[in-house]
Amino acid sequence: MIRKLNFNAGPATLPLAALERAQAELTDFAGSGMSVMEHSHRGKEYEAVHAEATSLLRELLAVPADMDVLFLQGGASQQFATLPMNFLTPGASADYVLTGVWGEKALGEAKTVAAMYGAKVRLAATTGVGDGKEKSYARVPTQSEIAPDAAAAYVHFTSNETIHGVQYAVAPGAQFPDFGGAPLICDMSSDFMWRSTDLSRFDLVYAGAQKNIGPSGLVVVLAKKSMIERGRKDIPKIFQYRVHADNGSLYNTPPTFAIYLVRNVLAWVKGEGGLPAIEAANREKAGVIYAAIDQNAGFYRAPVETSSRSLMNVVFRLPTEALEERFVAEAKKHDMVGLKGHRSVGGVRVSLYNAVPVAWAKTLGDFMNDFAKHNG
Ligand SMILES: *Cc1c(COP(=O)(O)O)cnc(C)c1O
């Protein structure tokens, strides 16, 4: 078997150990004579998996006791709509901070809900430059650029913009900026659990699983109980965080196999030494790729400002689009896949999520140096 060096942006590579465990357990889970997919979500076999996924996540990320862990469906995109549905009320306003396209999408859904409710959304900061198709983002805002409304229903930001490769708080020990006194909500889809994170500042954090912790379709929501309580009660039950929290994410049938895979991935994270070890590997991988860019600065160009460069999604350009195509095609011949930049921005994108081994980054870094030498 040849496992590709998979640099996909999401769905993304999963730890081989987590996949092999699924393979070994597939047809006969825990001696039960059936797969975990075929078990009732109310039976003891699945309940143990659900509880283990939850407790591993709580343990590895040190989730505060006053936060609930929810496993929901519809991906991060559904949260874009579910958040304003729960937390906006007539006359209220929500703040959004934009550093890329995912934040724009979250804002767009909030505008739709606000129009239905007679509420408002407001830009508390944006680093977008230009308009329409030419719009670009190359950094996170400075503290003084963030103009929060203390009376906002909440303030929303995206910790890592997957397409533009713009990430907050990347330096060792760096903290997120102060987003003001309103309840703080963060889309952490593409940098969830990339390192230990102080969650006490957040009222709600959500992350689509398919970047760092599992397969697509599943979204993890960490929410303070006090935030959940604020949610509206006059929206359909299926969209109320309260209902999912009260039922331990078992209000309706959850995506049991996806949650089982998250269990496998988190067990692997724990075996690797937890988030400190994962962070060290992530820093090493990103260091290798950025070094290859910077050492060939006349050939590769990173559009993102150094202090906002994402460690999860490294984006860069080559001198021409033809060379970019050739780069991606030649890398593929060496079993390196998933390197084409998002269609909206072009270029090359290297996604270095938790499950990408350091050795893959080194192989790609060597390839980048060779490619620059032969084509520069
Ligand atoms: C991938 C991604 C999303 C969308 O996730 P879906 O599961 O496709 O809804 C949202 N936000 C960020 C930051 C992402 O990287």
Image (tube, rainbow, N blue to C red):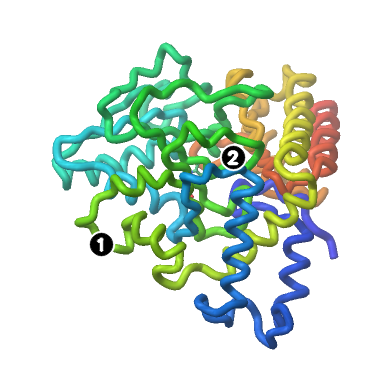
Residue at 47% in and 42% down = 205
Q: In this view, does 94 lie above or below 179?
A: below
* Along the line of sight, the residue nearer the viewer: 62 or 168: 62
Whole-Å distance between the Cαs marked 1 and 2?
30 Å
**Residue 303: in sight, yes or no?**
no
Q: In this view, does 119 lie above or below 150?
A: below
**Quadrant the N terminus occupies:** bottom right
**Residue 3: in sight, yes or no?**
yes
Secondary structure category for the residue under label 2: loop
Local crowd size for mark 2, using a 10 Å CA cut-off: few (<14), some (14–19), many (≥20)? many
**Mark 2, residue position:** 191
**Quadrant the C terminus occupies:** top right
Q: Is residue 264 above or below residue 222?
A: below
The image quadrant of residue 96 is top left
In the image: residue 34, left or right of residue 70: right
Is disc 1 in contact with disc 2, using a CB cutoff of under 8 Å?
no
Res. 236 mark: 1
Q: In this view, does 40 lie above or below 140?
A: below
Residue with the most extreme bottom position = 33
Residue 101: x percent and y percent?
44, 36
* Cβ of mark 2 under 8 A from ligand 1: no
In the image: residue 66, left or right of residue 89: right
* Along the line of sight, the residue nearer the viewer: 158 or 320: 158
